[in-house]
Image: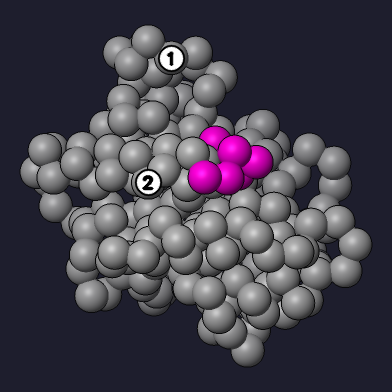
Amino acid sequence: MYADRLRETLPRVRASIEEACVRAGRAPGAVTLVAVTKSHPFEAIEAALEAGLTDFGENRVAELEEKVARFGRPDGVRWHMIGSIQSRKASRLPGVADLVHSVERLKVARKLADAVVGSKLPVLAQVNTSGEDAKGGFEGARVVEEILEVAGLDGLRLDGLMTMAPFVDDEAVLRGTFRRLRETLESVRHHAPHVGETLSMGMTNDLGIAIEEGSTMVRVGTALFGARPGYEAA
Ligand SMILES: *Cc1c(COP(=O)(O)O)cnc(C)c1O
């Protein structure tokens, strides 16, 4: 079932990414597609690997652990943690995540950094660009200073920033949200040039606009795999 679905959906998603790159005058390879497999069974990942996908996003630590236990961490496959992290679970992530997108606050950043043994853990700082209470992430007047503190932690390698846009259709609002993330990264890199240039922004409903505004990584679930079975975690 997942294999059949991906035969239809993956070319469509890839085409939307490429078309947005062309509109923005960017190279088609400039955007990484992270397939968001959260709450989908192993079969979804099997089909996705078969279809040539390499990057998988999960939003719960336990589910990420189960999937990494099943599929391992072979070369060329990357596991992305994209969901809110309870600080008591942070120490489990360095063993299973190749990139943690959802470092939402300093406390979690410090817990992650403390848990790292060996090479630095690649992370993104999540920014609440929409100001919605329900969304996590650094926000407010000190956002750049706080992200610079993350950048300074031993144990972490800050690759860039991540955001979730508000659930609206208003293109101007979405564009503004994504632009704010790009400008925040410019400010951070102005003070800390060693910070990476990854902008993780864009999901099923807004990936074209996100790419036009400079996204380098889109996180796509529904457009690839259909509606998620069972619960819908925030
Ligand atoms: C679920 C989720 C996605 C994927 O959302 P879709 O609308 O299904 O593409 C992307 N990013 C985060 C952080 C998510 O939790």
Helix, strand or loop for the magenta stretch, by majority:
loop
Please tell me whether mark 1 sits on a helix, a strand or a loop: loop
Residue extending farthest to the right is 118
For marks 2 and 1, give the one nearer the viewer: 2
Q: CA distance from mark 2 to mark 1?
A: 21 Å
Residue 51 horizontal side relative to residue 226, left or right: right
Q: Is residue 34 visible?
A: no
- The answer to which quarter of the image holds residue 208 is top left
Please give the residue where the numbered disc 1 appears in the rendered image: 26
Q: Amino acid at mark 2?
A: Thr
Q: Which mark is residue 184?
A: 2
Report the magenta residues as a range.
191-197
Question: In this picture, is 11 found above or below 49?
Answer: above
The spot of residue 195 in percent (x, y) is 60, 44
- Viewer-proximal residue among 133 and 61: 133
Give the image location of residue 132, x and y in percent. Answer: 21, 68
Q: Residue at x 45, y 61 (%)?
A: 145
* Near-viewer residue (176 or 6): 176
| Chain-order first, disc 2 or disc 1 | 1
* Callout 2–callout 1 Cβ contact below 8 Å: no
Q: Position of residue 38 (x, y in %)?
A: 52, 63
Please tell me whether residue 17 is drawn above or below residue 83 in the rendered image. above
Query: Does residue 114 appear in this view?
Result: yes
Using the image, tell me which numbered label, if any, was put on residue 160: none
